[in-house]
Amino acid sequence: MGRTFSKAAVLAAALLCLPAGAGAQGEVIRKGNLQVSYGGKIAPHDLPRVGTAPVAVSVSADIRTLDENPPPQLRRIVLAVNRNGRLDRRGLPNCQYRQLQPASTAEARASCPRGVVGYGEFKAAVDLPEQSPYPSDGTILAFNGRLNGRPVIFAHIYGTQPLPTSFTLPFEVKRRSRGTFGITLIADLPRVAADWGYVRGFSLTLKRRFRSHGEARSYFSAGCPAPRGFPGASFAFAKASFGFEDGREMRTTLTRDCGVRG
């Protein structure tokens, strides 16, 4: 997997999301009055033609309505990433749910420091009668872990307004052997998320270098699948699905480009 790539695709992956306007160019999906802006990027842009190099991966979502009414509650997130890259968990500790919940960001980091694989933001708003929506935002730390015997990424979310609140959102990690997209991350938002109001957006950058058994490793790595003689290539970066409480589901796919290093 580290050396063989299709000419059409390379890994670019997941979790979770930059606030509106903070990421790379994206796609806008609309259904009725509901709009989701989805974006993402991979860094660095220039990668090896053969083999892989460490990368940081970000994706983005911004949720709003066109008529300024509160959007329906976000209930499910599905992020699928290109199968021709590499996600390496070997040697990372598996953080446990009970270590992270309930806890502040600092407490969660201290409980499993070697399992941190990413960071980001969670943005929500409380709709108050006859007042502007009250921001209720939080920070995210992503942890490598297992839940019910399955690999997950724990997104630990913590905010201080209107009151200190934390919850931990597990993204189940699934792998597929066929098709363009091989790694899929699936999360169902708990009802406690509604205590912060409606979700406006969330962010996660996945980035971690570490050593295991004397070898340097990267949580995510990728190459640029450009044919010889070409300075770069376009590839299917990631596809996403957002499910809402009112039954609406928003889907989109991002295409990105890369340059050949050297």
Image (cartoon, helix red, strand yellow):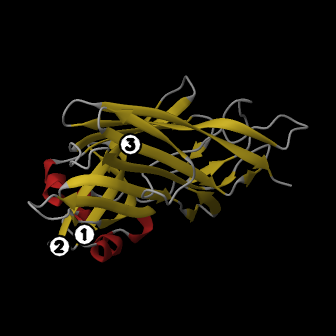
Compare marks 2 and 1 and give the one earlier in the sequence.
1
Compare marks 2 and 3 and give the one earlier in the sequence.
3
The total number of labels drawn is 3
Residue drawn 86% across and 38% down? 230
Q: Quadrant of the N terminus?
A: top right
**Distance from Cα at disc 2 to Cα at disc 3:** 28 Å
Label 3 vs label 1, nearer the camera: 3
Dot 2, crowdedness within 10 Å: few (<14), some or many (≥20)? few
Q: Quadrant of the C terminus?
A: bottom right
Label 2: which residue? 164
Label 3: which residue? 36
Compare marks 3 and 1 and give the one earlier in the sequence.
3
Q: Are marks 2 and 1 in contact (CB under 8 Å)?
A: yes
Label 1: which residue? 159
Q: Is residue 214 above or below residue 76?
A: below
Q: Quadrant of residue 10?
A: top right
Percent position of residue 215, x then y: 64, 61
Q: Is residue 185 left or right of residue 230?
A: left
Quick one: 208 or 194, which is closer to the camera?
194
Q: Residue furthest left?
A: 129
Q: Residue furthest right?
A: 229
**Distance from Cα at disc 2 to Cα at disc 1:** 6 Å
Q: Is residue 151 left or right of residue 191?
A: right
Name the amino acid type tagged 2.
Pro
Name the amino acid type tagged 1.
Gly
Percent position of residue 243, x then y: 29, 35
Q: Is residue 176 left or right of residue 146?
A: right
Label 2 vs label 3, nearer the camera: 3
Percent position of residue 236, x then y: 60, 35
Residue drawn 74% across and 51% down? 47
